[in-house]
């Protein structure tokens, strides 16, 4: 080990740059949630629990997006039904 290190050319920040499309955030999760995801990663043979949490959030968003789109389609059909019936009668 050296007696003195020269940090004059050093830069602050992450050693590993963020990949495009990713953001570094601070989030508070229950310990049990983190432990559960950690166990899932271990059971799968390794990996990153953060990636697994990201995947779970994406699936949740996708499921809710589909539900919202189905609801919108239903409302549009119900609203258009009288108009379509009037056009058929004429």
Image (cartoon, rainbow, N blue to C red):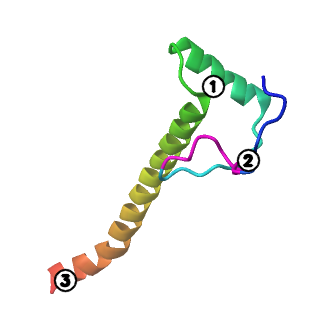
Q: Which one is in front in this view, the residue at disc 1 or the one at disc 3?
A: 1
Alpha-carbon span between mark 1 and mark 3? 56 Å
Q: Which residue is mark 1?
A: 37
Q: Which residues are magenta?
A: 9-19
Left/right placement of residue 19 relative to residue 42 reads left
Q: Which residue is mark 2?
A: 26
> How many residues crowd around disc 2 within 10 Å: few (fewer than 14), some, or many (20 or more)?
few
> Would you place residue 43 above or below residue 57 in this image?
above
Left/right placement of residue 62 relative to residue 2 reads left
Viewer-side residue, 60 vs 27: 27
Task: Tell me the SS state at disc 1.
Answer: helix
CB under 8 Å between discs 3 and 2: no
Is the magenta region chiefly helix, strand or loop? Answer: loop
Viewer-side residue, 71 vs 3: 3
Q: Earlier in the sequence, mark 3 or mark 2?
A: 2
Task: Tell me the SS state at disc 2.
Answer: loop
From the top left corner, tell me how far across and down residue 8 is, in percent: 75, 50
**Residue pushed farthest bottom?**
90
> How many residues crowd around disc 1 within 10 Å: few (fewer than 14), some, or many (20 or more)?
some
**Residue pushed farthest front?**
3
Left/right placement of residue 11 relative to residue 67 reads right
Magenta residue check for 17:
yes
Residue at x 55%, y 12% (from the top left corner) = 43
> How many residues crowd around disc 3 within 10 Å: few (fewer than 14), some, or many (20 or more)?
few
Residue at x 28%, y 80% (from the top left corner) = 83
Q: Which residue is mark 3?
A: 87
Magenta residue check for 14:
yes
Q: Earlier in the sequence, mark 2 or mark 1?
A: 2
Alpha-carbon span between mark 2 and mark 1? 17 Å
Residue at x 41%, y 64% (from the top left corner) = 72
From the top left corner, tell me how far across and down residue 75 is, in percent: 41, 67
């Amino acid at each position: 080990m050296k007696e003195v290190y020269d940090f004059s050319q050093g830069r602050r920040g992450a050693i590993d740059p963020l990949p495009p499309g990713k953001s570094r955030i601070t989030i508070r999760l229950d310990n049990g949630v983190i432990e559960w995801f950690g166990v899932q990663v271990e059971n799968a043979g390794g990996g990153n629990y953060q990636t697994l949490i990201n995947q779970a959030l994406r699936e949740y968003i996708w499921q809710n997006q589909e539900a919202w789109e189905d609801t919108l389609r239903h409302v549009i059909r119900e609203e258009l039904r009288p108009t379509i019936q009037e056009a058929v009668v004429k």
